[in-house]
Image (cartoon, helix red, strand yellow):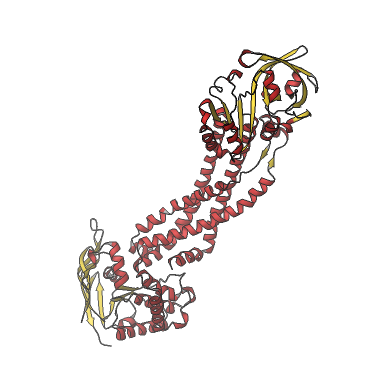
Amino acid sequence: MKTVIDAHEISKVYNPDTIPVYAVNGVHLHVDEGEFIALVGPSGSGKTTLLNIIGGLDYPSSGHVKIGDVDITELSENKLIDFRLRNIGFVFQAFNLIPVLTAKENVEFVMLMQKKSKHERSERSETLLKEVGLADKMNCRPAELSGGQQQRVAVARALASKPRFVLADEPTANLDSVSAGNLLDMMARLNKEEKMTFIFSTHDQRVIDKARRVITLVDGKVHSDIKQTE
Amino acid sequence: MYLQLAWRNIWRNRRRSLITMASVMFAVILAIIMKSMITGVWGKMIQDVVSFSSGYIQIHKTGYWAEQSIDNAFATDSALIHTLNSNKAITSWSPRLESFSLASVGEKTKGVFINGIDPDKENTGTKLASKIVAGNYLQPTDRSVMVAEGLAQHLKLKLYDTLILLGQGYHGNMAAAQFPVKAIVHLGVVELNQSMVWMPLQACQNYFTADRMLTSVSVMLKNNNDMDEVKTQLLALPLAATYEVMNWKEMLPELDQMVEGDSAAHFLVIYVLYFVISFGIFGTLLMMMNERMHEFGILLAIGMKKHIMCVVTVVEIIILSMIGVIAGTVVALPILLYFHQNPITFTGELAKVYEGFGMEAVLPPALQPEIFLSQAYTVFVLVLLLSFYPIYKIMRLKIIQALNS
């Protein structure tokens, strides 16, 4: 199994010179291709901070994160943006689609930044939107879509760049139970069929139940790391 | 798609964008109207004063301006006349022979300024005939004079009375003659109204014994802006070493200083206006940046480079300001065209004050394209300068802070 993420002894400390607060404290994390991981823990346990660090959105105070062969903690801000664009997909709690672009344009946008051809962008965005069940909503703007539909567009956008893995920060938190269930089923299917690696931070029991590996964080440290069967 | 994104971003908050465009539009309207009125009023003032006194350019024998004596008269050459006739920037030119004499009627005597003119050419430039209050305009072959109204009153002169003139002619010759009064002319400038006498050039040359001699050639131009170029062309003529070519700024430095001083004061007002506008636009930019900080964080997270984000944002600002600038120009143009056709005209005491300075009491706006272009350009540059703020904010953006905002 190919290693996707190898995080070694990562810590994130705020106010190091006064009263240090450890958001993440000496975490080791090894993620293989095709894993479906739920990162759980109480509020303030460091889930989002850890997700931000392995997603290259934030730098750790110490430790290293390797994505494939690249140590992203050594990359400059600009190189890190480019790295994220080509290797990491993001799904946010509040969907965060670009409100002035249609569903299709939102998905295409990531590929535009990757300088993909217009034809390729159009073809892949249509394929992805069909895959997430929004073939008939391609030309709708986010405001014209329900929360669940918007989150599906967000998943399609996250997959558009053909990333090594997708990070999802509380993706079901703003969805009703039916939409949340549908979204989870869809992501589980993508994980199974396309071997796409997903890492969720969540409080949602349905996500935890679906996950095949559950990592619990407490006070910035890994409290437990349990593999579970479906 | 980036352009599309910028365009749609403008319309996502329609009201705010419309307010921004309106503020730019009104700024441009105000700036254009103000600049046009200032330029127009000063242009008219310069035209009125200059056309009636010096002309835009004068040609004299070298040294005449320092010592304005008839002994410093000169004879024109054919190359100079050809240039004056063929230069398209020159609307008219007028030869003059000017000097002083004593004027006498009965018991009354007064020092007067004699101006020998080519009646047709002079009238083209100065519209002298329009200032006649009694009698008829001079003909080139007349042996009669026109007298300023104030002088006529002082000497108790009436039409067809005889004016006796006595003075010094060219190179010490005696100048003495009598002329019938053919017309009385009203001048707004009191000093001139009490001292001017005009006679046809040939009669004047005979009176001063200065056959074919001139003291100056006054040149009128289509546009004040052509002045330096025409001066350079005149100075390039073969006999230019014997002439001095002066523009009105050199001959009437007080007027030039007055224009410069007043223009500076008005430009200060315009710059205050720009300053106020800048704050309006800056307020919009502040709101826009604060509103979209989270979105910028998302765009960064999904891989948008900061410089592309800056370009998209600046394009948005440029489109916003361009629409405002174009709308402002389009609205200002008919307003100014109307006032150009129907200029504001002063009446009563204010009109008398204007006329006292030899100016028409009207406020015609100027319509030169550069007025529109310069104001539009200035507002555009202002907006570009203000766009450094969003660029600065984006370049300093911390992704986690933006995402949490």
Tell me the quarter of the image containing the N terminus of chain B: bottom left
Q: Nearer the viewer, residue A146 or B360?
A: B360
Which quadrant of the figure has residue A75? bottom left
Q: x and y percent of residue B68 in the render?
A: 58, 20
**Along the horizontal axis of the image, is A91 left or right of B63?**
left
Q: Residue furthest top?
A: B107
Which quadrant of the figure has residue A203? bottom left
Q: x and y percent of residue B179 in the render?
A: 76, 19
Question: Can I make out residue B85 in this image?
Answer: yes
Q: Nearer the viewer, residue B364 or A215?
A: B364
Picture residue at 46% right of the left edge, 60% below the top: B316
Q: x and y percent of residue A115 in the render?
A: 36, 70
Residue B8 vertical position relative to residue B201 in the rendered view, above or below: below
Residue B37 vertical position relative to residue B404 in the rendered view, above or below: above
Tell me the quarter of the image containing the C terminus of chain B: bottom left
**Along the horizontal axis of the image, is B313 left or right of B248?**
left
Residue A115 vertical position relative to residue B161 in the rendered view, above or below: below
Q: Residue furthest front?
A: B78
